[in-house]
Amino acid sequence: MFVKNESYKQLDAFSTQNSLTKRQQILWENSVEHKFFEVVFTSIDESIFKVLYSKKKSRPNVPVNQLVGALILKHIKNWTYQELFTNLSFNLLTRHAIGLQRTDEDVFSEASIFNFQNRVIQYYESKGKDLINTVFEKLTEDQLKQFEIKTNIQRGDSFLVGSNIVEYTRLRLIIEVLQRLQRILSKEDQEKYYSVLEKYMKGSADKYSSKIRKEDLPKELGCLAEIYHQLIIELNDTYTDEVGYKNFKRVYGEFFKLVQGVVEVRPSKELTSSCLMSPDDDEATFRRKQKVLSKGYVAHISETAHPDNSINLITDVVIEKNNVGDAEILENRLPEMVKKTPDLEEYFTDGLYGSPAIDLLTQEYGITQYQTAVRGRRSPSKLQVEQDQDGKVWATCGGGQRIQAKKQKCWKAEFKLKICETCPFQSVCSIQIMGGKIKPGRRVYYFADKEILSHARMRNIENLPPERQTIRANVEASVKEMQRGMKNGKVRVRGLMRVSLHIIFTAIGINLVRIASKNQNISEYLDDMLHCASSIINYLWPYKKHRLSPEVI
């Protein structure tokens, strides 16, 4: 049964805070944990999670704001679960952060926090709604209003998030999946296929695959292909509800193929980035980005970037399989970003975020996209197309010709051939290279509406003052903050939803730390330190007549 936790709203007479000295009180109020209590913990809307609990009268739930708060703290501090519960049990500031006022209050058990996360994941899988992301959005909305942060200028970037899985070779993966299939077989089937599977069941898949020489690899894969084919036919979906069988069937389809009734091993060039990477994470995919190989996911973040903001907060977070391109992620996410920050006018990205679909979206929402670099080959003849304020479309080349284009099925610009013959860019003319038609006395260039938008996007960054052209750069610092605690590019969890929870909790923590660093009352803190220093010096100073004041120190 769901019950709200509001015990923290009334200060207990025997609370820890009441026994603090004046100096301790100042340190307490300037701590990140106290700011967490004020800004995050008290703002967590527990009713969001009411759907996870029974409506019948029964045992009350563990306080949801404590569970969510504890998970956010875990990611702020980069703690393991053991470190989290040690601090929840014995660290007074950590306990204060989640509303525990007295030292004789017991915190919830480890099982409670694991069960809570499982319920959140199960709800997402059944209903398609991420409750933790809802918490993040609500917290961020309140913080943007409270601290008067302008959201009309934002920036975004993506980064790879490796899943916590073993780095399998193809042979090792195929054997590992076969071993796991054998474990779920009935006793009768285990006996039936004992002679077929015997040699693969002795020791680990890693141990077996390490003994195979490179020249023997094709033969070994061929033997496994026949075993897979035999089992697929004879088991005939008997174990269709078992995860082990689902992975087995998937590996068969992805790594082998039937050619005229004979099973063969697929060549490496036919394997895709969506192939199974690990039986422990069937959602992870493969991607190479800037010479970095990763098996897992990609995270995209957006944050405020107005020059007048004293602090900037992360406003949007999304996790996708890592074989989804940055442009596709932004295309899918932009409508959601506009819902959350409807005043969005400028968005800064790198060169991977450009596409015709995004150009149409930004035009629809009245957003100007600024790219610090543009992907693809630039026109060697410096050919550009643009639309003026009167709606006229012009094509301009590096040779100086500016021609008004006419609309037929597509746009058409006719350049004067006599001028083209003396043009210094004649040998590399983009009109020829891009398929234009040469007719007597003229050179014709055809282009579509999408090119007008893409050329406008490419020019946007050039029209900005130099000091504003570097706005996107600071998002890379935010990416590094998001990656803190990732070892070798991997998080400690597996699966799209668990990785998503990790990234969202981290984003909430980063926003909190930024708010705490801005709002910490440094002057009060320093004044208190000076008074403490003067008291200590005066106590030790042998000449009582010459006491020191804080101002002297």
Image (cartoon, rainbow, N blue to C red):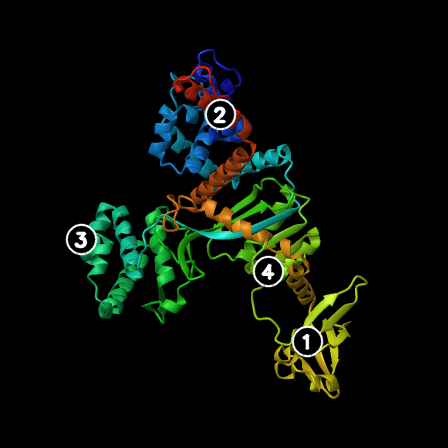
Residue occupying the point 51% across, 25% down? 552
Q: CA distance from mark 1 to mark 4?
A: 24 Å
Looking at the picture, how far across and down is residue 200, in whole percent? 21, 56
Q: Secondary structure at mark 3?
A: loop
Q: Is residue 536 left or right of residue 173?
A: right
Can residue 78 be seen from the camera position used here?
A: yes
| Local crowd size for mark 2, using a 10 Å CA cut-off: few (<14), some (14–19), many (≥20) | some
Q: Earlier in the sequence, mark 2 or mark 4?
A: 4
Q: Secondary structure at mark 2?
A: helix
Q: Which residue is mark 1?
A: 398
The residue type indicated by label 2 comes to Leu
Q: Secondary structure at mark 4?
A: loop
Q: Is residue 254 left or right of residue 376?
A: left
The residue type indicated by label 3 comes to Lys
Residue occupying the point 30% across, 58% down? 174
Q: Which mark is residue 530?
A: 2
Q: Which residue is mark 3?
A: 202
